[in-house]
Image: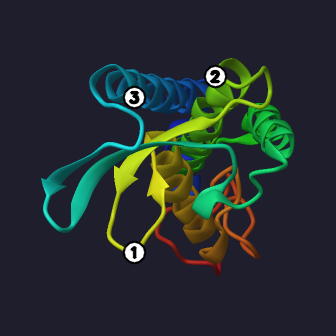
Amino acid sequence: MDNPERTTAQHGSVRAGRCVAVAAAVFTIAVVLDQTTKAVVESTMSLGQKIPVIDPVLSWHYILNPGAAFSIGTDVTWIFTILQAAVVVYVATLLRKVRHLPWALALGGVAGGAAGNLIDRLFREPSFGMGHVVDFIALPDFAVFNVADSFVVCSMIGVCLLIFRGVNLDGSREGVGPPADDAPESGRTGP
């Protein structure tokens, strides 16, 4: 009989509690970094101000965005509030099934990024649920974004890679069942 710890490691899965803790840590880091950087920008820059960081590749450009990326949907801010809240709730419920650390990392980042911008939507002017998001990271010929946006995009790339590789939430692969407890250790499949 195989060692259960070794079988679990071969399968790529870990305890649910560990995955939730990892996702919670990534979530917390995303929210704290996002809200801290936004607070620094608001306290040190004036609205509309641009500061070159690595000219001409990167600059800080303090704006308030009522919409989504590229200021899409500026008249329906409340929809983004609902969507971001739904993402956070969905990821929280999905984490009960996660047994694979890469999934925990990716989902924690998605939820943390969504929560960072949700905080802006809920508590910034002009009103509750209609708040404008603080954006400040500017690249040439691209949207101005923030740390929360970065977490969402990078984490969604991770989610896509996991899906394309066929990795399930428990670490198993599409079309490949969990390892049998009685499989020979040598890797042979026959008698």
- The secondary structure type at the circle numbered 3 is helix
Tell me if residue 35 can be seen.
Answer: yes
Q: Tag 2: residue type? A: Arg
- The secondary structure type at the circle numbered 1 is loop
Residue drawn at the location 62% of the way across and 28% of the way down: 120
> Mark 2 or 1 closer to N-term?
2
Residue at the extreme bottom = 190
What residue is shown with label 1?
141
Q: Name the quadrant containing residue 37.
A: top left
Q: In the shown orientation, is residue 62 left or right of residue 45?
A: right
Callouts 2 and 1 close, C-beta under 8 Å:
no
> Closest to the observer: 101 or 77?
77
Query: Which image quarter holds the N terminus?
Result: top right
Q: Is residue 26 above or below residue 149?
A: above
Residue drawn at the location 42% of the way across and 36% of the way down: 47
What residue is shown with label 3?
33
Q: In the shown orientation, is residue 4 left or right of residue 45?
A: right
What residue is shown with label 2?
124
Residue drawn at the location 78% of the way across and 20% of the way down: 128
Image coords of residue 161 (percent x, y):
56, 70
| Coloring applied to the structure | rainbow
Q: In the shown orientation, is residue 115 left or right of residue 45?
A: right
